[in-house]
Image: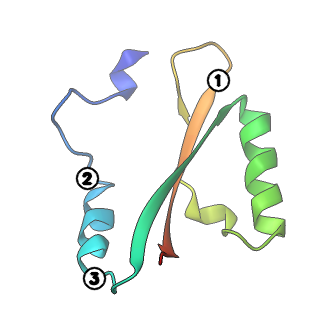
Amino acid sequence: MMSNFQAPGTKSQALQPLEQEDLMLQPHQETVRITVTSSPEGVKAVIRDLHSRRFAEANDWCPPVPTGKIGEVMTVLMKRVWVD
């Protein structure tokens, strides 16, 4: 089950575009990472709830990955926000 995780010090190819986007941020913008960890049903419920509140599109989240605990998955959303 640990094969789903990367070795320390390696970068995921999926995250590389996100790092490149950080270079294009305007002043007073930053990227935040929002993580949801729960059962698959709990994760889906949070994604649906945040979508209904127009916080994020449902397909903006990464695919859920197992955490190593039975019945638990994790998903991540990267979102740009304005900061003062």
Dot 3 alpha-carbon crowd within 10 angstroms: few under 14, some 14 to 19, many 20 or more? few
Which residue is at a point 42% across and 66% down the rendered structure image?
31
Image height of 50 relative to 65, above or below: below
Q: Which residue is mark 2?
A: 13
Compute the Cα span from label 2 to label 1: 24 Å
Q: Is residue 82 in view?
A: yes
The percent coordinates of residue 51 (x first, y second) are 76, 66
Q: Earlier in the sequence, mark 3 or mark 1?
A: 3
Q: Which residue is mark 3?
A: 24
Dot 2 alpha-carbon crowd within 10 angstroms: few under 14, some 14 to 19, many 20 or more? few
The percent coordinates of residue 56 (x first, y second) are 66, 68
Q: Is residue 63 in view?
A: no
Which residue is at a point 51% across and 74% down the rendered structure image?
81
Labels 2 & 1 near each other (Cβ < 8 A): no
Image height of 68 relative to 50, above or below: above
Labels 3 & 2 near each other (Cβ < 8 A): no
- Left or right: residue 4 versus residue 50 is left
